[in-house]
Amino acid sequence: MRQSVAPSRISHAASLASQANNAAAMSRLQEKKKEFEAVAALERASALFLKRIEGLADDCEVMADAGQGFSIPS
């Protein structure tokens, strides 16, 4: 009697499905890595922006303090 090829076909189909799932998972992983890198870059840019704004605030305080020493005669 001839042996069935159905088990090997099922195994082959499972292998193909597994490969497709792995490819999809790798694609999702690459997308998540890109998202993570973009968020990290945004955090770095935000921190730099905050430092620059704080520097401007310090400069404004210095100018305000300097302006209090002067009175403009009317």
Image: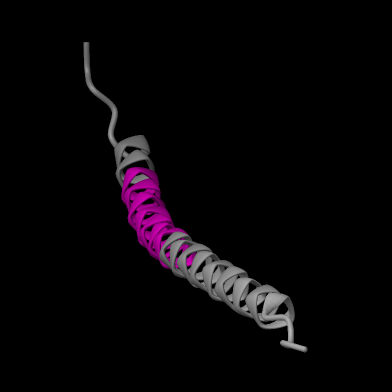
- Where's the N terminus, which quadrant? bottom right
Residue at horizontal 74%, vertical 80%? 7
| Numbered range of the magenta stretch | 36-62
The image position of residue 5, as x and y in percent, is 67, 80
- In the rendered view, does 15 fall on the left or right side of 27? right
- The answer to which image quadrant residue 48 occupies is bottom left
Residue at horizontal 36%, vertical 59%? 45
- Where's the C terminus, which quadrant? top left
- The answer to which image quadrant residue 19 occupies is bottom right
Residue closer to the observer: 50 or 12 = 12
Q: Which secondary structure type mostly characterizes the magenta part of the structure?
A: helix
- The answer to which image quadrant residue 30 occupies is bottom left
The image position of residue 55, as x and y in percent, is 35, 56
Residue closer to the observer: 68 or 51 = 51
- In the rendered view, does 67 fall on the left or right side of 31? left
The image position of residue 3, as x and y in percent, is 74, 87
Against 73, is 65 above or below? below
Against 69, is 56 above or below? below
Residue closer to the observer: 46 or 25 = 25
In the rendered image, residue 32 lying in the magenta stretch gets the answer no
The colour scheme applied to this rendered structure is one colour
